[in-house]
Image (cartoon, grey):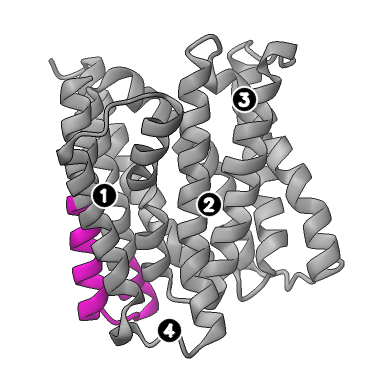
Amino acid sequence: MPHSPERRAYLLLAAVIVTWGVNWPIIKFGLAYITPLWFAVARALLGAACLFLLMAARGRVRLPRRADLGLLLSVGVLQIGVNLALVHVAVQLIEAGRSVILAYTTPLWVTPLAAVFLGERLSLRKVAGVGLGVAGLAVLFGPSAAIFADPAGLLGNSLPVLAAMISAGTIVHVRACGRSVNAFDLAPWQMLAGAAVVLPAALVIEGPPAVQWSATLAIVLAYNGALATAFGLWAYVVVMRDLPAVSTAVGSLGVPVVGLLASAVILGEPLSLDKGLGLALIVAGVLVVTVFHSRRA
């Protein structure tokens, strides 16, 4: 049907893939005008403001319950605050295209964590998928990347992987909590928690905000707050609700592909062999892990 929820969800998934993928070179643009930690603070605050407005329009703004505190802190502090800080610092240090590939290895780390903490069965297919993903990381960290001789490059390549691992831990925690809370109702409060945890770090590490105000920065912040954060989160919640898990998992792999291509077109970053091969192996590993897991769930 032309206006079915499933059709709308596929259109939203395509919009999310493009919005999130293109945002990686946009972040790189923004870092020419604002330091990475203050960028993370601004993005979280703008995302919270947009989500509060959206929730208010729907009459759904409510204070978090005491029972929600664990999820509020886990997702807000780790998934949003720490994750944004790590990713923004990484994009400042290395290519945006390389960053997005490394940051989207989260499903690989969910697999062993879920086996240890949730008791999920670790099948041979899942082990093979993780192995493929780790092989992709080895390509990106290999001698051809020449990053081990460059401390800044090594740090920049390591931070998105650390962010992916933290995201994986948060996902496992959310799964363990069950479905007792509407994730979207907590989202604006989690954004505020993320900003609150990065703010003191920004003050200590980067000092008072040193911002070069310009029309470009205004566009970058508006895109990150309204589209990449608020719209992206709302749309992805709808996608997860209305599409099969396999479609969502496979579709999300479009983000690093779009991010790599967008970085090449917008920033002129080279489409090198190590990035292409690393992306292919990581995507293959995530496909094996998520698709087979979803079909058996």
Instruction: Mark 3: give few (<14), some (14-19) or many (20+) Cα within 10 Å.
Output: some
Q: Residue at x 22, y 44 (%)?
A: 127
Question: Distance of mark 1 from mark 4, alpha carbons?
Answer: 23 Å
- Residue beneath label 4, please? 147
In this view, 153 is above or below 89: below
Label ID, residue 223: 2
Please tell me which residue lies in front, 133 or 245. 133
Q: Position of residue 110 (x, y in %)?
A: 38, 39
Q: Amino acid at mark 2?
A: Tyr
Q: Nearer the viewer, mark 2 or mark 4?
A: 4
Crowding at dot 1, Cα within 10 Å, few <14 / some 14-19 / many 20+, comes out as: many
Queried whether the magenta region covers residue 258, the answer comes back as no
Give the distance between the C-alpha atoms of the residues marked 1 and 3, in whole angstroms.
Answer: 27 Å
Tag of residue 130:
1
Tell me which amino acid carries mark 3: Leu
> In the image, 249: left or right of 216?
left
Q: Earlier in the sequence, mark 1 or mark 3?
A: 3
Decide which of tag 3 and tag 4 comes sooner along the chain.
Answer: 3
Q: Nearer the viewer, residue 112 or 110?
A: 112
In magenta segment, residue 273: yes
